[in-house]
Image: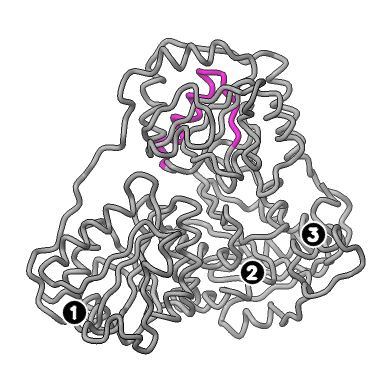
Amino acid sequence: MRIAELIARSLASFGVDRIFHVPGESFLALLDALHDCPAIDLITCRHEGSAGLAAVADAKLTGRPGVAAVSRGPGLFNAAIALHVAEQEAIPLVLLVGQVDTPNLDRGAVQEVSTLSNLSKIIKGAYRLDKPEAAAEVLRRALTLACSGTPGPVVIELPEDCLAQPAAQAAPTPCHLTPPVPAEPVAGRFAQVLDASRRPIMIVGGQNRTPEFRDALQRFSVQYGLPVIAASKQQDQFPNDHENWAGQLGFFASQEHIRLLEQADLIVAVGTRLGDLSTVGFRYPRQGTDRQKLVHVYPDPDVIGSRFQTDLGIPCDALAFIAPLLETPFRRNQATEWAHAIEHTREALHRWHGTAATAADTLGHVVYACSRKLSPDGVITTDSGNFAAWVHRIFTLHPRNRLLGSACGAMGSGVPAALAASLRYPGRQVTAFCGDGGFLMNGSELITAVARGLDLKIVISNNGSYGTIRSHQQRTYPGRVVGTDLANPDFSLLAAAFGAKGIRVNHASQAIEKIDEAYAHCGPVLVEVICDPDHTVSDSL
């Protein structure tokens, strides 16, 4: 068995069944090993950035490490956006990087890059398989590290000549660790803190995305009288029509959420590190003399208490915290005034119920038409941009739905995420929402979807601009638009050239008919929506 086969078998042993890659001559031996490894599906992508972002999305769907393989130098730096996203969103990612052969290591060979010295701030670890006798140990350590504590990205360098050398050990198998549980019973202490509050709010992150957690979360919210706000891009964690649903925190928090967080006297943070987005720029929970109490649940003990004074810190898995509390007789009802505040927030954040079919509101009507088609287990992906506000406002998601979006704002993620979802769930409906700018970054993966015969739909908001930046530009420097306009192709014709079905929506009055046509087609469909660059989402909400 060569080191190349050892890598393939190790990945399969750790539950990896898919690798997204752009081929490189430095890891041809690994590709050769994967030829005889039917347990792993090798997805050939058109850009290392989209391969990495697809792997990140796949990890979100499975809870296992997403894996991408790229060549050194340009390949590594093209894929670095996925490393950044994985670090920002705590997603387990393993990036395999072809490297120069061992005699030329650290000699400045063509395309040679030291991963650790260049990317140490955004990765959990960097490993190099340059010692065949220790290769199995290194693989086990790297694959385990990606998922442990706060999950994140790990890079494994593969010197070209080492891949062909014989392996000294068998492929490692994972150590099946149970999720971290509370070190001591916390039901009584939690009930005491909760009983002392009148206006508690729960902020739920994406640390645990399993169906079991989502079911338990809903029952927990009812039993303990806790309204739920989802962290950014976690809208699918809780039923959006539930009376305890208080909406999703966006990249820029709404005034409704700010008012709600300002009034809260207790924040229960579950499955989130409490970064700047989930705390509105580290404003909540409030510190100082009028400090808001905080209960923080997260598996990594280094996170708890690192930024905020914490009244009850519980370093454990989100489900391991909630499940035992469901077995207690404790029940608590929300105060009437607080329940009304939650209802007001929910209605304010989902208040678009359709307007007259004007050209200015075309995208809103298209998103509404798509929401009518959402299947009970449909998957939605969003690229970054203001257009996504329509999706979050109009779609009503339930726990069987999945939402894949870039919480850290990385553009170009919408199509790779849809590719990953369609491959992972071939029988489920998948719809991607993109801006014209984001689509042209990684939209070439549409051809990968065509080649694989995937049934996914892509909706592009074509306003001829980097719309989010343009809106900020107009507010800061009125009438001085520069550097944010885009020249675009005819996206519907581009789709046809790719072998997909192309549809164009020029006016809101066409939305229902065109979207019905799109979802009636079996196979990849691209829907181009012509939008006004000077008409922002907020104008219609």
Q: Of callouts 3 and 1, which one flags the residue occurring earlier in the amino acid sequence?
A: 1
Type of residue at label 3?
A: His
Whole-percent x, y for residue 460 in the image: 68, 67
Q: Residue furthest right?
A: 479
Q: Residues within 10 Å of mark 2 (few under 14, many from 20)?
A: many
**Left or right, 422 with reference to 320:** right
Mark 2: amino acid: Gly
Task: Identify whether 139 is placed above or below 152.
Answer: below
The residue at 47%/60% (across/down) is 421
- In front of the other: label 2 or label 1? 1
- Residue 274 position within the rendered picture, expressed as x and y whole percent measured from the top left: 53, 39
Q: Which residue is mark 2?
A: 438
Tag 2's secondary structure?
A: helix
Q: Quadrant of residue 158?
A: bottom left
**Label 2 – label 1 distance at C-alpha:** 38 Å
Residue stretch rendered in magenta on the structure: 210-229
- In the image, residue 294 sits, relative to residue 386, either above or below, namely above
Where is residue 239? Give x, y as percent. 57, 36
Based on the displayed image, in which of its 4 quarters is residue 288 positioned?
Answer: top right
